[in-house]
Image: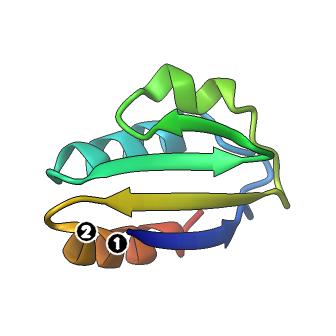
Amino acid sequence: MKTITHVLKDPSGLHARIASTITAEANRWKSNVTIVTRGVRSNATDMMGLMLLDVREGERIEIVVEGEDEDQAAKAFEGLVIGL
């Protein structure tokens, strides 16, 4: 299991474009990817679930990657979150 911690920098929070980007990336991998914030979890392949997390600017998220290709998937998500 790999965990990436990130503080959301986008002033609009986790909006549809960001959720769509995360979902598309999660769908590329065999590993299970979960987003966690304030103790609430959502599967990263569920765009609506991500938006319902209601993550705002300055809030911390954890991206938990678990599965057979977790090393590669975690590296991809590390690169992805730089722009968030």
> Residue drawn 80% across and 46% down?
38
Q: Percent position (x, y) of residue 58?
A: 85, 61
Q: Is residue 55 left or right of residue 35?
A: right
> Residue drawn 67% across and 57% down?
61
> Residue drawn 22% across and 59% down?
67
Label number found at residue 74: 1
Q: Dots 1 and 2: beta carbons under 8 Å? A: yes
Q: What color scheme is it?
A: rainbow
Label 1: element kind: helix
Marks 1/2: CA–CA distance: 6 Å
Quarter of the picture holding the C terminus: bottom right
Residue bearing the label numbered 2: 70
Report the front residue among 33 and 57.
33
Residue type, numbered disc 1: Ala
Q: Percent position (x, y) of residue 1?
A: 38, 68
Q: Percent position (x, y) of residue 79?
A: 40, 77
> Residue drawn 28% across and 43% down?
24
Residue type, numbered disc 2: Glu
Label 2: element kind: helix
